[in-house]
Amino acid sequence: MSDTTTNLLLPYILAAQAQKHVTHNEALRILDGLVQLSVLDRDLTAPPGSPNDGDRYIVGSGATGDWAGWDEDVALFTDGTWLRLPPRAGWLVWVQDEARALVWISAVWTPLDVAMGLLSQAASVDVARGALGSTTGIAVLEQTLAGLTGLAGPTVTSDIEIPDRAIVLGVSTRTATTITGATSYDCGIAGETSKFGGALGIAAGSTNIGVIGPQAFYADTPIQLTARGGSFTGGAVRIAIHYLTLGAPT
């Protein structure tokens, strides 16, 4: 008979064992650390300086100190010491600083949405993946122009860009703070200033969904806002680039 249970490796109380409460308490500590498993972080390679009792971490690769040799294991701080909990197939864990669920598959912590083929809400998501690693995805890039300083001048160019080889569905806008100086504005790119909308509203809350083609772009291309009826002297506009992504086989 083994000294531990099969799945969680909880220690058994053996016949004629002295101080049976020690073994029993050790099993309770392991259960307390594993049930409803939630870790604070999964990137640290050394224990934090002042952990709280019950804190749990997934140990990062190349661990040192008390965590040396514990790469990818769960580390539980309990009763003033670190306890190692090696993962088993199918373990689920919630990573608090990422707000993401992981599952242990083939010796790797894999995002649950990836393991189950689910779509997640993120700035860029692959919706199809071939056997050779090629992908088709959907993505969005956002920026507020021009942030805290407002808009200024006849044109304002975005820091974000339509990526090279992206297939663009459109660019949407929202006037976040009432624009001053101009009577309206256009949203587009250099050479096509109203490609995604012309004579757009300057009042706070005005929106536009600038749908196109879709159209493939073959160079990184920023978005440009062009003032009409005068130059921008203030205000703020939020922009979003909506596009498809293509990934080659690996």
Image (cartoon, rainbow, N blue to C red):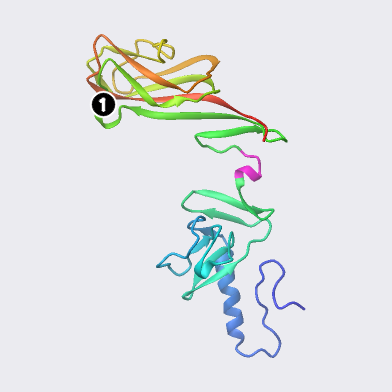
Magenta highlight range: 113-118
Residue 181 horizontal/vertical position (percent): 22, 15
Question: Percent x, y for residue 205?
Answer: 33, 23
- Position of residue 217 measured from the top left corner of the image (x, y, whole percent): 52, 18
- For the N terminus, the quadrant is bottom right
- The answer to which of 42 and 206 lies nearer the viewer is 42
- Using the image, determine if residue 10 lies above or below residue 14: above
Q: Which quadrant would residue 167 be assigned to in this image?
A: top right
Residue 85 vs residue 11, the one in the foreground: 85
For this orientation, the residue located farthest to the top is 229
Q: Is residue 33 above or below residue 240?
A: below
How many numbered callouts? 1
Query: Is residue 21 rendered magenta in the image?
Result: no
Residue density around tag 1, few if under 14, some if 14–19, many if 20 or more, within 10 Å: some
Is 114 colored magenta in this rendering?
yes
Residue 54 image offset from top left, x and y in percent: 48, 67
Residue placed under numbered mark 1 in the picture? 150
Q: Which picture quadrant has residue 149?
A: top left
237 lies left or right of 5: left
Closest to the observer: 44 or 212? 44
Q: Secondary structure under badge 1? A: loop
Q: Quarter of the image containing the C terminus?
A: top right
The correct choice, above or below, for 14 with respect to 70 in the image is below
Amino acid on which the number 1 mark rests in the picture:
Gly
Residue drawn at (60%, 33%) of the image? 126
Residue at (56%, 25%) from the top-left corner? 244
Q: Is residue 127 above or below residue 47?
A: above
